């Protein structure tokens, strides 16, 4: 069991959406002890697309965000998240869909 969790990982995540900015942070629990995390702060108009993926053989999901940078190039960022509920995914999807539709 210890080997399983050290290989697949347990990730803590924070997703905040205010009226101007989307903030996403994902941290592997062990790496977080050393201050290592993946962060993304983008304005609403940079959000192009998003998707949740179920990771096989783990309790993790991946949130993929496609963003458009200042040069117009679309970049995909992936965040691993552990034990996100369907309700949480629904709430996040609702907010992201609203942002995409209101452009």
Image (tube, grey):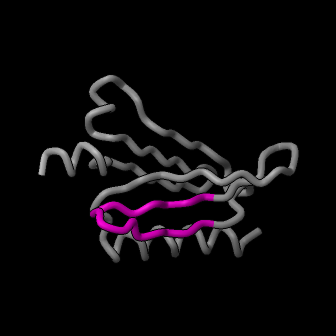
Closer to us: 18 or 48: 48
Residue 61 lies, in percent from the top left, at 39, 63
Residue lying furthest top: 34
Q: On screen, 102 above or below 76?
A: below
Residue lying at 77% horizontally and 53% vertically, measured from the top left: 68
Residue 75 lies, in percent from the top left, at 72, 51
Q: On screen, 90 above or below 2?
A: below
Q: On screen, 39 above or below 22?
A: above
Residue lying furthest right: 71
Left/right of residue 1 with respect to residue 70 in the rendered view: left
Closer to us: 5 or 18: 5
Left/right of residue 34 with respect to residue 41 in the rendered view: left
State the extent of the magenta-drawn residues as a range: 50-65
Q: On screen, 79 above or below 36?
A: below
Left/right of residue 64 with respect to residue 32 in the rendered view: right
Residue 48 lies, in percent from the top left, at 71, 63
Closer to us: 7 or 92: 7
Closer to us: 53 or 21: 53
Residue lying at 33% horizontally and 41% vertically, measured from the top left: 28
Q: Quadrant of residue 19?
A: bottom right
Residue 18 lies, in percent from the top left, at 54, 54
| Residue 54 is one of the magenta-drawn residues | yes
Residue lying at 65% horizontally and 54% vertically, measured from the top left: 76
Left/right of residue 69 with respect to residue 7 in the rendered view: right
Q: Quadrant of residue 30?
A: top left
């Amino acid at each position: 069991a210890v080997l399983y969790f050290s290989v697949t990982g347990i990730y803590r995540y924070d997703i905040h959406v205010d009226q101007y900015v989307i903030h996403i942070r994902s941290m592997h629990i062990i790496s977080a002890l050393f201050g290592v995390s993946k962060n993304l702060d983008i304005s609403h108009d940079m959000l192009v697309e998003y998707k949740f993926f179920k990771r096989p053989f783990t309790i993790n999901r991946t949130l993929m965000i496609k963003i458009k940078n200042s040069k117009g190039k679309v970049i995909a960022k992936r965040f691993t998240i552990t034990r996100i509920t369907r309700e949480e995914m629904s709430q996040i999807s609702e907010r992201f869909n609203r942002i995409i539709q209101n452009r």
